Image (tube, helix red, strand yellow):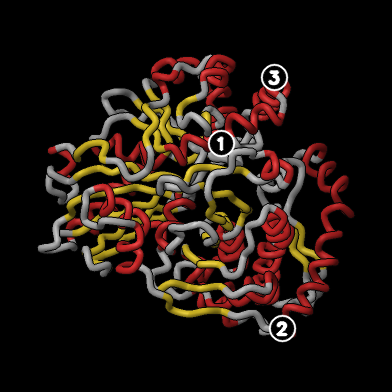
Amino acid sequence: MSLLGVDVGTSGCKAAAFSSDGGCLAIAYQEYSFSRPLPEYAELNSLEVWEKTKQVIKEVAAATGKDKVQALCVSSLGEAMVPVSKRREILGSSILSFDRRGTQYSQALIKEFGLEKFYRLNRNLPGPHFSLPKLLWVKEKQPKLYQKADYFLLWADLINFMLGAEAVTSNSLASRTLLFDFCHQDWSEPLLNWSKIPREKLGRIVPGGVVVGQVTKKLAEELSLDPSVLLVSGGHDQCLNALGCGGISQGKVVCGLGTYECLTPIFAPVGEPLGFLKENLNMENHVLPGLAVAFLYNQAGILIRWFRDTFASAEASQPNIYDKLNQEMPKEPTSLLVLPHFEPVQWPTYLPETSGVIVGLKTSTTRGEILKAIMEGIVFHFVPGLTSLSRLGIPVAECLASGGGARSDAWLAIHADILGIPFVRPRVTEAGLTGCAILAGLATGVYSSPEEAASIFIKKEKVFYPDNTRHRIYQEKYRIYSRLYPAIKSVLASLTSEVKV
């Protein structure tokens, strides 16, 4: 018997099967790319993602041998929705959060409700990167598609639906739509009425860790699964990452290093949320009951992949390319500054009129220095966030690292040196998949509690402690970094809005 975790991200999908004693039996990965039909657009080919998700499920299921899959759970990126019919036909592309469509609708939402009133309802700072603005864009600009779609589902719930589950939306992902009422744990009637989005198009709200169906006989045969496999509601990838790292109680902080980096503190839901609003922090459900999470996030792996494809394109297909590039990085802090705004920034403030910047280049600059400076810039973005958490009474003593980026010793060392706190890498860094397996096991009675499951799955592999000398250097460098965007803000805005190629 095994438990299957599936993760659908912006740039690839993964699956892994785990035995009940926590051992990883098989893992598979498929990469894909988002497209830009127009310069300000960014979308996934939904059919391609579904096909590649089936491929990784099939590959892993076929490799489990006698440990047949008992239950399956999915984590995914947030915000992006997929139009689908009741007959489980995918009808269109999936618009990503950093796509610029829908800006006017988020502005209208703030004007209608006001920021404080909206935040009390939804616990998010409205912006065009959430689902609702994109959905309203589809409703206005693609009315035939909007009418034809019976549901608009977020990716984790879409995969379960395509496999045979009922059409539901897990509560952690529902929060990313801007249509969710956090207090009542349901779709918000005021927000549905304002947007004129029928509740029926969104699926029933369920918490994470609920059995929502079984895989269809046809797909079970196609994917080397038994038709008795139970489908368990999952949720937002950062929440599953947190669970898979051991983030099962208040006071834990998880650092998910994927296409985006996300620091995820875990705490009990607060009755008065405006302190979080003051700190520009969103709030949503954890996949475990009685817990909430906040997110500090920005671009991360997407920038490393850009660097690879731009500066090492001839070597990009080599299996150990990232190890090779990491070896080229200097040991000490660089003299470069990188503003990690290569895509519109979503936190702590939505910044569409900006762009990435590399300062300090010379003819002697190496690509290893540029790579390390990109990593430094990514981490600098989070420095003020730790201060915000401290003001809210959420101290950060250490971070539990997860995701593909957590496999890099160099990157975790940079995090520890800049932020001044230890970073812990668990033995299994694909924590999202581990979290899915844990949640599937909890839903089906394999484990009696999150504590039992965590004791089985989660082991520390290595702790990266800050180097005091480098930390002092980075503190000074951050003071310079913090002046960079304000100094060139107007230039970047003019460049983004006025220069047309």
Residue at horizontal 59 percent and vertical 29 percent from the top: 121
Looking at marks 3 and 2 on the same chain, the residue that comes earlier in the sequence is marked by 3
Q: Residues within 10 Å of mark 1 (few under 14, many from 20)?
A: few
* Residue type at tag 3: Glu
Labels in figure, total: 3
The residue at the far front in this view is 271
Residue at horizontal 78 percent and vertical 71 percent from the top: 336
Q: Nearer the viewer, residue 247 or 340?
A: 247
Q: Position of residue 264 (x, y in %)?
A: 55, 55
Q: Position of residue 97 (x, y in %)?
A: 57, 40
* Residue type at tag 1: Pro
Residue 59 makes an appearance in the image: no
The residue tagged 3 is 112
- SS at circle 3: helix
Disc 2 from disc 1: Cα separation: 47 Å
Q: Nearer the viewer, residue 368 or 202?
A: 202
Residue at horizontal 66 percent and vertical 84 percent from the top: 331
The residue tagged 1 is 37
The dot on residue 392 is none
Q: Is residue 424 left or right of residue 331?
A: left
* Residue type at tag 2: Asn
Q: Residues within 10 Å of mark 2 (few under 14, many from 20)?
A: few
Residue 445 makes an appearance in the image: yes
Residue at horizontal 53 percent and vertical 37 percent from the top: 176
The dot on residue 468 is 2
- SS at circle 2: helix
Q: Is residue 260 above or below residue 177?
A: below
Disc 1 from disc 3: Cα separation: 32 Å
Q: Position of residue 375 (x, y in %)?
A: 65, 68
For the N terminus, the image quarter is: bottom left
